[in-house]
Every structure is written in C-alpha cells, then in structure tokens.
Image (spheres, grey):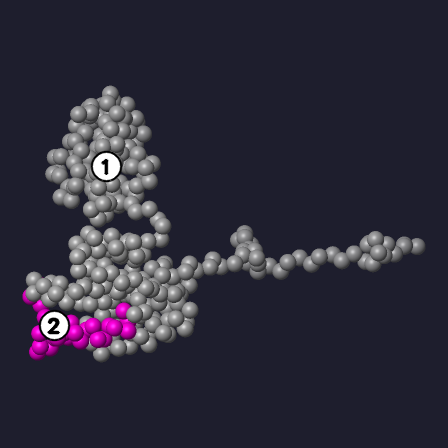
Amino acid sequence: MTSEPTPDLSPQGQPARVPEPSPTTVPSGIPAIEAATHAPEPSEAEVLIITGMSGAGRTRAAAVLEDLDWYVVDNLPPRMIVPLVDLMTRSGSTLERIAAVVDVRGREFFTDLVEVLDHLRQSGVFYRILFLDASDEVLVRRYEQVRRPHPLQGEGRILDGLGEERRLLASLEERSDVVIDTSELTVHDLAREVRAAVADGTPETLRINVVSFGFKYGLPLDADHVVDVRFLANPYWITELRHLTGRDAPVRDYVLGRPGALEFVDRYVNALEPVLAGYLGEEKRYVTIAVGCTGGKHRSVAISEAIAARLRAQGQRVIVTARDLGKE
C-alpha cells in the first residue's frame, strides 16, 4: 500500500508557502526595470524678467545672459511668459534658465505683466526681476546718438516719452529684485553687473577653440592667436607616417618626441595664462587659437591636441577642431 506524501511543514506546524513566480511583464531577454526605480526629479527652473527704461541697456544684458547659456526671448508679450515657463518645466525639457525681456515696446500688452507675475507666484514658479535704469539726461543723450525716437514719445519730445515710461514702470521697479543704474557704466561694467546678479557660484571660464590648419590653405579668419609649428620635423617625409594624421598614435608620438616639442607646448600654455585671465577681465568670452603647419594634417593636429589637453587640465573649456584635415 502506497503511503501519502508527507507535507512540508514549517516550524510552527503550518504548511510552508511556496512563493509564486513574478508575472512576466517584459519580453524575454529584456531586463525589467525595478519597481523601486523613480523618474528623475526635474531641476528647479530659473526665470528672469529683464525690464526697465528704454535705452538703459536691456539688449546688452540679454546678450550677456545668452553668453551664460540662458535661453533669452526679447520683446516678449507678458501673456506669453506663462506658456514659455510651462514649456520649460515640462518633463523632458532641457531648458533650465529662461530670461524674458519685457518692456513698453509691447504697448498695451505691457499692462498685463503684473497680473502674469502674480499668476506665476501663485503657481509656485520662482522668478526674479532685473530692472535697468539710467538718468533722463543720459537716456536723452543715448537716444540722440542713435537718432531714434522713444517708443512712447508720440508727437512729443524724448523727455515726454521717458516720463510716461517711468510712470508705467514705477510699480514694477518697486518689486524688482535687482536694480542696476547704468548711467555711469560702460558696456563692460554693465556685463559684470549682470553676471554678478545671476551668479550661481560657478567659476567664470572662457570658451576656447583650438583649431589646426595648413598654411597652404590660408589663416583662419577668426584666429585670435596663431601658432606656427613648422619648426618641427615633418612626418610627411616618413613613408610609414605619411598616410596617417596627427590624431594617430604613431604620428602623435613622433611629433611630440621631437626635440623642443613638449617644451614648446608647456611654455606656450604658461604664456597664455595671464592672457586668458585678461580676456575674462575685459568680458571677452570666446578665443580661437590657430595652430598651423604646412598642410594641416600632422604636426598642427598633434600639437593642437596637446595644447588643448594642458588647457583642460587647468580647468578651461576647450574644443578642438581640425580645419584642413582630409583636404590632401
């Protein structure tokens, strides 16, 4: 007589529970995402409203912000700020910092600005207002220099337009976070003030483009510095290296192994240090260093990569391009 199978009992004498297999939710061979995985939280958006007196430097301020990678919209009707911010805060958007230039050029639309700002605040959107101002005397002089009428002067004088503009902007100036008087500022001084107003603690850096080229094809038109590396032996005359470029290890090792090559790179980068610092002080944000040899294929390519590597080691933002590579 066959006996019944003895059930598997837990220490408490209860039948042990066999866990059920998880249901298949994805095709075979594709790893399932863990249930505990959460979507990344969107970064907090930055919204800056640029406004103020006409002629006080709004255009210059907008250009400075563009150089700082802000998304800038000029002469935006206030009602369009809300959908613009919605677009920025939408999931998947890469926009993190938006600056909207809003002023009396919008005519009747400008009166909507206070209502729009109240709506943003109630919606939990953090924004700041940058207000640019200048004395009437300076503004009149600036308008006379460009020979353009004030947008609100109508048939009257420039001073009439300025007076009306100050009346419309009075309440907005009171609620501004930053007010910059540009009466005595140069364009470079204004740029520094704007950068300080939006500073996030990130060190200021240049955007450096190191471009290799061949002298036989002409100098790059946008070069700020030109480096001639034709003092180094030319790999072109070595059969095994002729078909390669300065990006290939055999050519790179040959060029950098020539007497004086590495010493030149080190001394040149050291000589650039005070120059690059001076560019920052003078609000120059882009610089192009052109490195040339005969054809732009071997020596200039290898040396430009070496210069770029040392600049990056100093914390600089560097892009390397080879203008004439492939022309031979």
The quarter in which the N terminus is drawn is bottom right
Q: Which of 149 and 225 is in front in this view?
A: 149
Q: Main secondary structure of the magenta part?
A: helix
Q: Mark 2 is on which residue type? A: Leu
- Above or below: residue 19 compared with residue 307: below
Check disc 1: other Cα within 10 Å, few if <14, some if 14-19, many if 20+.
Answer: few
Q: Position of residue 199 (x, y in %)?
A: 33, 53
Residue 70 visible, this orientation: yes
Q: Nearer the viewer, residue 232 or 104?
A: 104
Check disc 2: other Cα within 10 Å, few if <14, some if 14-19, many if 20+.
Answer: some
Residue at 23% x, 45% y is 281
- Above or below: residue 154 compared with residue 328: below
Q: Where is residue 49 in the image (x, y as percent from the top left)?
A: 29, 66
Q: Where is residue 169 in the image (x, y as percent from the top left)?
A: 24, 72
Q: Mark 1 points at which residue?
A: 274
Residue 326 visible, this orientation: no
- Above or below: residue 118 compared with residue 326: below
Q: Mark 1 is on which residue type? A: Pro
**Which residues lie in the magenta part?**
146-173
Of mark 2 and mark 1, the one earlier in the sequence is 2
Q: Toward which corner of the image does residue 26 lie, by quadrant?
A: bottom right
Q: Where is residue 116 in the image (x, y as percent from the top left)?
A: 33, 74
Residue at 25% x, 36% y is 273
Residue at 76% x, 58% y is 17
Q: Toward which corner of the image does residue 111 lie, by quadrant?
A: bottom left
Q: Mark 2 points at which residue?
A: 159
Labels in figure, total: 2
Q: Nearer the viewer, residue 246 or 49?
A: 49
Q: Is residue 248 shown left or right of residue 19?
A: left
Q: Which of 204 and 16 is in front in this view?
A: 204
As drawn, the residue found furthest toward the top would be 259
